[in-house]
């Protein structure tokens, strides 16, 4: 996925967020830390998989922890720059997309 360094689409950003969720949930220690810090539970995570704000929040959590970001990027072969582009894309979706959703 290093090709995403060229820029990232909204769909690619959603994919990065979902990959991060899979990454965080695959490790019991990381899962516990994430759920404890966010106050979420796994049911809520599943229910909000298509919620852009929720996905952006997950990547916000990722961006706040450099070691976690590094581990995620190494495991998924996504560059840190692409992960941050995904976060920015989800935090501020294109205005055209917002108009289409309304």
Image (cartoon, rainbow, N blue to C red):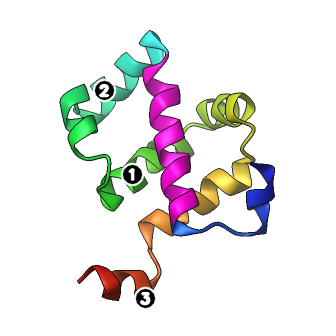
Residue 65 is left or right of residue 38, and the answer is right
Q: State which mark lies toward you, 2 or 3.
A: 3
Q: Which residue is mark 2?
A: 35
Residue located 21% across and 42% down the image: 47
Residue 36 is left or right of residue 17, and the answer is left
Q: Position of residue 87 (x, y in %)?
A: 52, 58
In the image, farthest residue toward the top = 28
Q: State which mark lies toward you, 3 or 1.
A: 3
Residue located 45% across and 12% down the image: 29
State which tag comes first along the sequence, 2 or 1.
2
Q: Which residue is mark 1?
A: 55
Q: Position of residue 14 (x, y in %)?
A: 48, 55
Q: Position of residue 74 (x, y in %)?
A: 74, 31
Is residue 43 visible in the rendered image? The answer is yes
Q: Is residue 22 magenta?
A: yes
Query: Is 45 located above or below residue 100 in the figure?
Result: above
Residue located 43% across and 11% down the image: 28
Where's the C terminus, which quadrant?
A: bottom left
Number of numbered tags placed on the structure image: 3
Q: In the rendered structure, which segment of residues is drawn in magenta?
A: 11-26
Cα–Cα span, label 2 and label 1: 14 Å
Query: Is 44 located above or below residue 30 in the figure?
Result: below
Is residue 41 visible in the rendered image? The answer is no
Q: State which mark lies toward you, 2 or 1.
A: 1
State which tag comes first along the sequence, 3 or 1.
1
Secondary structure at badge 1 equals helix
């Amino acid at each position: 996925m290093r090709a995403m360094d060229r820029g990232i689409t909204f769909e690619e950003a959603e994919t990065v967020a979902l990959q991060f969720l899979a990454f965080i949930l695959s490790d019991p220690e990381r899962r516990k830390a994430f759920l404890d810090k966010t106050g979420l539970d796994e049911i809520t995570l599943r229910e909000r998989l298509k919620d852009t704000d929720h996905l952006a929040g997950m990547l916000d959590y990722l961006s706040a922890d450099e070691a976690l970001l590094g581990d995620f990027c190494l495991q998924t072969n996504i560059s840190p720059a692409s992960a941050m582009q995904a976060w920015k894309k989800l935090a501020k979706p294109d205005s055209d997309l917002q108009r289409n959703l309304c």
